[in-house]
Amino acid sequence: MLKRNFLSRISRRTVIKGAAAVGALQVTSPFIIKALGDTPVKVGMVDPLTGVYAAYAQNEVTGAKLALEQINVRGGVLGRPIELLVEDSANDVGTGVQKTRKLIERDGIQFLIGDVNSAIALAIGQVSNEKGILHIVSGGHTDGVTGKDCHWNVYRVCNTTSMEANAVAEQLFTKYGKKWHFITPDYAFGHTLQQAALKDLEKFGGTMTGNELTPLGTTDFSAYLIKARAANPDVLLVLPQGGDMINCMKQIAQFGINKQIHVAGLQQELESLEAMPPEARVGTWMFEWYWKQPGVPHVEKFVADIRKMNFSKVPTARHWFGYTSLMTYALVANREKTLDGVKLAKALGGFELPDDVKLQPNKCYYRAGDHQLMTSSFVGQAKTAGKDDVEDLFEVNTVVPGDKTSPAESDTGCTLQWPA
Amino acid sequence: MSGEQARKLTVLVAIWALLLLAPYWMPPLGGYTALGTRVLVLGLAAMSVNFLLGFTGVLSFGHAAWFGLGAYGCGLMLKFIALSTPLGLIAGTVLGGVMGGLLGALIVRRRGVYFAMVTIAFGQVFYYIAFQWSSLTGGDDGLRPFSRQPLHLGFATVDILSDATAFYYFVLFCFALAVAIMGFILRSPFGRTMLAIRENERRARFLGIPVERHIWIAFTLSCFFMAYAGSLYALVNNFADPRGLHYSQSGDFVIMAVMGGMRSFWGPLLGAAVFVVLQDYLSSVTINWMSFVGLLFVLVVLFFPRGLLGVIRRKSEA
Amino acid sequence: MTQLLLFNVTNGLIIGAFYVLMALGLSLILNLSNVINFAHGGFLVIGGYIAYTITPYVGFWGALLIAPPLTAVIGLAVERVLIRPLYGRDPLYSLLLTFGLAFIIEDGTRFIWGAQGKPVTIPAFLAQPLSYEFFFITGYRLFMVAVVLFTVALLFLLLRYTRLGIRIRAGTLDLETVSALGVNVRALRSLNFAVGIYLAGLSGVLAAGQLGLEPTMGAGVLMPSFIAIIVGGVGSLTGTLLGGLLIGVASGLAAVFLPAASEAIMYVLMAVVLLIRPRGLLGEEGMMT
């Protein structure tokens, strides 16, 4: 039932034809109500399919498409098929908000997924809240989403920045030293990530030798690296994401800094590692999900399924985010036998994911107090080259369960206000 | 002459009828009210760009700066100072307009490509300020949370926050106000001078027109209109972010004006409608929508430099 | 502290050299054809991706030789088909056209090579610092500066001593007279455009070795090149050279004292120059005003 399956490359050739067909479908009058069994349940997804986060967003969509296939094969939601409507937020808040309104007001979606960009995730959370639509933030990490800006209708699958910091901090401190230097992207995500890590560092009794705030879109990090090395820390924490991180790591490797200072970071992704030359794939990081988990049930099947729709490439954490977001909705709606937003939002509090969805060894559930998924962190080392598989670029040392990395519910700053 | 006037009147009535009835005819055609609101706001912005480009002949490629400043002015007022929609609009308009006027004085002697480049670069200054001053503007995450406030009209209170149709009419009212002022200025002796400068700057100078001052006034007025549109945009999104100030946004406004027809008053609105609807539609059906939008730029430049209205007009004249 | 300053001035010059390469291409096209090439960053990306694609077959050195001319050929085709009809028309149109072209190029590269960034590997002996102390001077960065120096010297010699160069310079000053003297202005513009795009392609190959190669990377380097031209003065290639180095050093220094301003400092520099000397540092009075 995927009307706009524009993400598969084959369909691009027929885009014009498809566009015309979709247009015709959209023009049909919404006033004719068909028998309930025929009407699909519409689910919307807003993600930055173009712009700097395009690779991450497109993988989330692929993950959601796999979930869509599986759900519809198993009978859909309440006997109705799910229809996934994907919209490009173009990494622009205004566009994201507009697309969300379009999905809700015109298409009449029951459930919303998105966005990779934290700022857009917050902004469209405001819209979904205003309209009372259940919403899962798939890939925006800033604490606020399940912290001080939390809403009764908004849940989140990916980690908070605090969780990421807590997952890595202790290991870094005990193994590599107590003087840390930060390279922090100068926007909300970076600030919260850095503050969370600093809080841990101070708790253990370490010191910060400096914090380089780098503007988003920085291409040349040499000036910051010069300062960082002059401060002579034990650990250099690289916090930028996406293209900025790739540039930074490339330059760290060329300057040979990783041979003098232990390089680490909090969030790392397979998409980013694959975009770096081998010599830049170094350091201690956390993955939010990793495809190689020997002995954990259902993971291999998931990897095989994604490979089939992803040019034989393995799933990344982003695939899992998209997959889990949509699966969650189908599971909870079928269990509660309703599509009512408030009822489903209530039911999701404490909802535990089954083995074939969580795809990780630890217990994985949505916390009722702040609506954050308690998902594991995969802490380990980046590898310059994969042994058995070119995409095996990460060596997992420990898998830390979500309730170990997450701050207590009372410390998140979230107070949920339910509709009367 | 009376035939010409009658024709103009018919067109005017038709435009306003279409705008007034938009919430009723759009949904059945697959549109949605919020899209109509967006067309109005971006259309007003394109008309403001055209006020300078089409009627004075000066190419500013950094006008998004004033648009974005308007949005920030409005948002900052609503977030920090007063919970009032009209005050927000005023704050945004003044902020963007005054800044535009100040910088305009610096660059008003430049012309052509050089003027375009300098306006782009100055526009980017504000982009970086908004981007970097995160304690005030929220940086890349944008300015939030704030939201448009109900209108207190004395006899009634209108909820423009959750009622999309009411908000559309509010924006339409604001739009009509700005358009009326713009039309009035263009019909005034000052407006005639602007046209004279556009047609032949040297001759205008010989006639004793203080060209620089007139261009500066036109530039400043255009900035005020732009900032006003930007304030409305902040109300549309309940949000302001640096991208609204970026030069790529300026490019969108200029192409709207050119696509609709630079030499006509209503052209940019038509251009904005086509551009916004097309972009909204294309980006829903194909991930490669950017290519199509880029292609639109190329096609308009190569084949419709006079814009849609230009083509229609030439056909009707022939 | 002085050491830190020295480091950053050197570093700024290295970055500036890269801006110069971009800005010179942009400047060439602007001066002769009055076209602001918004797609210049796009051509940089094309150059980088071509290099990425052919490196497995011809190696890094082969790519460095082959990718820029290939980019120039694409540029030439674009000039013939899209830009040529716009000469003599209001600069607005070429501005809009190249603006749209930048969209198409970004989307096209994403379509062909995918949204995920691509790793470009440079020869190992270049990818390391020359000394422990001056770790930020890697072989590669030094190599980049050398390439820029060589290219700039070649370009200036070409403009000064060859017939083509003299014509380009003359055309910059007064195209009508040059045309009246029987020079084929069309061919002159095409060649000039191709040279400009060649420089963009070369920047692309060099950038790919240092930065992450991804479809959106073009936009980030366009603005500094713009500012280099304005600061240096429109119409003067030497000015562009000076402007590029200046903003490189300025942003290097800003990163020490006020990192948040490392981008904004370029604009401040530009505003100051425009206030004191509206035509730019080495701009000719009357050029493009």
Image (cartoon, coloured by chain):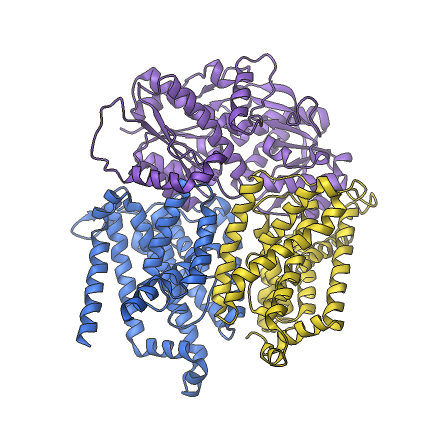
User: In the image, is residue A216 above or below residue C171?
Assistant: above
Residue A142 visible here: no
Q: Residue at x 56, y 62 (%)?
A: C80
Chain letter of the blue region: B
Q: In this view of the protein, which residue sits in the foreground, C65 or B221? A: C65
- Which quadrant is home to the N terminus of chain A? top left
Residue B8 visible here: yes
Q: In this view of the protein, which residue sits in the foreground, A275 or B219? A: A275
Using residue C160 as the reference point, say whether residue B104 is left or right of it.
left
Residue C215 image point, x, y percent: 57, 45
Residue A65 placement: quadrant: top left
Q: In this view of the protein, which residue sits in the foreground, B22 or A309? A: A309
User: In the image, is residue A180 above or below residue C284?
Assistant: above
- Which quadrant is home to the C terminus of chain A? top left
Using residue C24 as the reference point, say whether residue B163 is left or right of it.
left
Using residue A253 as the reference point, say whether residue B281 is left or right of it.
left
- Number of numbered labels in the structure image: 0
Residue A313 placement: quadrant: top right
Residue B224 image point, x, y percent: 38, 64
Q: Residue at x 41, y 68 (%)?
A: B53
Query: Colour in which chain A is shown?
Result: purple
Q: Residue at x 47, y 69 (%)?
A: B104
Residue A100 image point, x, y percent: 37, 39
Residue B87 image point, x, y percent: 32, 55
Q: Determine the residue located farthest toward the left in the rendered image.
A: B155
Query: Colour in which chain C is shown?
Result: yellow
Q: In this view of the protein, which residue sits in the foreground, B139 or A411? A: B139
